[in-house]
Amino acid sequence: MTRALGRRRLLATLCGTAVAGAGCLGSRDDGPVRGSTSSESLAVDGTEYDSIVVFRNDDPAPWTDLETLRAVTDVFVRTETPVTYSVVVSDDNADERLDADHAVAAYLDDLRADHGDLVDLAVHGYTHTKETEFLGRSEFGGLNAAAQRDRITAATDLFDDHGWDTDVFVPPYNTYDETTADVLADEGFSLVSGNWYTLEDQFDVEGYQLDGDLTHLPMNLSMEDWDTESVRDIETLKRGIDRNNEASGLNVIMLHYYFYADQQQRETLEELVEYATAGDTKALTLGEVADKLDAGAIAPTEDGWIVDE
Ligand SMILES: [Zn+2]
């Protein structure tokens, strides 16, 4: 049950939250246990929620099978669940880009026109190629600033051609470094969503960071197991959601549409969507989180989040 709150002081940090098992994460598919914001207190008028959930559907690209992507979109539309599509604009191997006449670009245009209230787009690198071995593999981490900027602006130029406005960046392989963050801020991005362990490893930040030039809001739950290349068991996923909710009241759930070609997988996705959005939970896109942060319309509280609708 939600309740409207008057203006109130909010805890600026969740770092005091005691969580059992904080140091013993079972898997990198599951997130860390707490987040951090600035040392300054935030104050937001709005509705308090126990938790926030964000869905991030990665990899719509020139090579995308539209039948599968359409079927995944249907799950989010049918359940009226906000979702961010992290889009790769260029296929280096096929020398193919999401130009104006590309079928996938046309689909994304239609998606924005028909369901722009639910779906927004984020820049997911330029080519999604492994350019370095930074943290295993990265399109950006380890490159110099000029090279990173070239790739980022090549992507945003194509976004601009379509009128796809976004200030959200999702680095391929979830890996990025401080240079990436500097270039993104300089290019007008306000939010980056990688993974929680890159944030810990490179920025010494646990969970998320809401202050500064660039918000870091990493995924903390992966729907797929990358060792077995399959959708994870629904009960395991539900436990991950519960644990994230207990720890920080935040789930940023990463999925890849191409795992959901079969009805059975889509049923798992739909069950997970229903579970993650149940109760006193606010579902938002990454773009909505970025906009609300810019407007001072969202903030963590002692035991949840406050959101100005
Ligand atoms: Zn990707």
Image (cartoon, grey):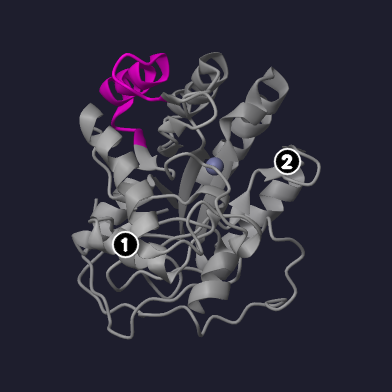
Q: Is residue 270 above or below residue 296?
A: above
Indicate the secondary structure of the residue bearing disc 1. Answer: helix
Q: Report the amino acid beneath label 1.
A: Val
- What is the span of residues highlighted in magenta in the rendered image? 97-120
From the viewer's side, name the closer residue of 53 and 291: 291
Q: Is residue 153 above or below residue 47?
A: above
Residue 77 coordinates in the image, percent (x, y): 43, 25
Residue 174 coordinates in the image, percent (x, y): 54, 54
Q: Residue at x 62, y 59 (%)?
A: 133
What residue is pinned by disc 2? 234
Q: Residue at x 24, y 62 (%)?
A: 186
Q: Which mark is residue 183?
A: 1
Whether residue 4 is visible to the viewer of this picture, yes or no, is: no
Ligand 1 within 8 Å of disc 1? The answer is no
Q: From the viewer's perspective, is 225 left or right of 3?
A: right
Q: Quadrant of residue 269?
A: top right
Q: Residue furthest right?
A: 228
From the viewer's side, name the closer residue of 24 and 90: 90
Q: Residue at x 43, y 66 (%)?
A: 304
